[in-house]
């Protein structure tokens, strides 16, 4: 319960930060918040938060690989790809798929960066790939 509360507070803070600087600009979407808080979990090496942003299907697959090793690998990749980044360095486009799925396309400092397959589970957007 404590982890859910902390995650909720983090999501709220990111949502507020996205709107505080520019009141006319809408805050991050649910999919964008998932990415931003997921990258924070990676930077902080917060294993429990990292796990929470994956779909059930991915959690089962990733458990076989070893969570801690996977988190360390993602931390290295995140550092190499984005370095010292801030949320405002990213822009996003969400392309809906079938049902409650889609792809979040990520642009970093104006350059196409990557994309993430996402799925909505229990009213929350989760990462559905590794």
Image: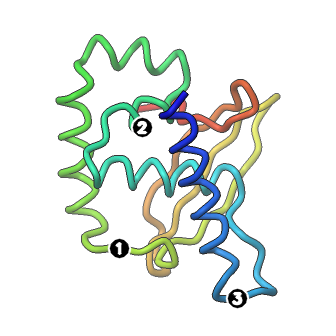
Q: Earlier in the sequence, mark 1 or mark 2?
A: 2
- Which residue does the numbered mark 1 point to in the structure image? 85
Q: Is residue 41 above or below residue 62?
A: below
- Quadrant (top left/top right/bottom left/bottom right) for the N terminus: top right
Q: Nearer the viewer, residue 46 or 94?
A: 46
Residue at 77% x, 74% y is: 26
- Which residue does the numbered mark 3 point to in the structure image? 22
Residue at 23% x, 52% y is: 77
SS state under label 2: helix
Q: Nearer the viewer, residue 15 or 75?
A: 15
Q: Residue furthest front?
A: 2
Q: Is residue 76 above or below residue 5?
A: below
Q: Is residue 108 above or below residue 8?
A: below
- CA distance separating discs 2 and 3: 28 Å
Nearer the camera: disc 1 or disc 3: 3
In contact (CB < 8 Å): disc 1 and disc 2:
no
- Which residue does the numbered mark 2 point to in the structure image? 49
């Amino acid at each position: 319960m404590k982890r859910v509360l902390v995650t909720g507070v983090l999501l709220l803070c990111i949502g507020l930060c996205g709107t505080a600087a520019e009141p006319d600009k809408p805050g991050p979407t649910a999919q964008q918040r998932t990415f931003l808080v997921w990258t924070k979990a990676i930077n902080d090496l917060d294993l429990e938060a990292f796990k929470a942003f994956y779909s059930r299907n991915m959690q089962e697959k990733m458990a076989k690989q070893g969570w801690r090793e996977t988190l360390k690998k993602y931390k290295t990749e995140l550092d190499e790809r984005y370095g010292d980044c801030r949320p405002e360095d990213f822009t996003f486009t969400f392309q809906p798929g079938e049902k409650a799925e889609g792809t979040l396309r990520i642009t970093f400092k104006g350059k196409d960066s990557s994309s993430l397959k996402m799925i909505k589970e229990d009213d929350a957007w989760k990462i559905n790939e590794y």
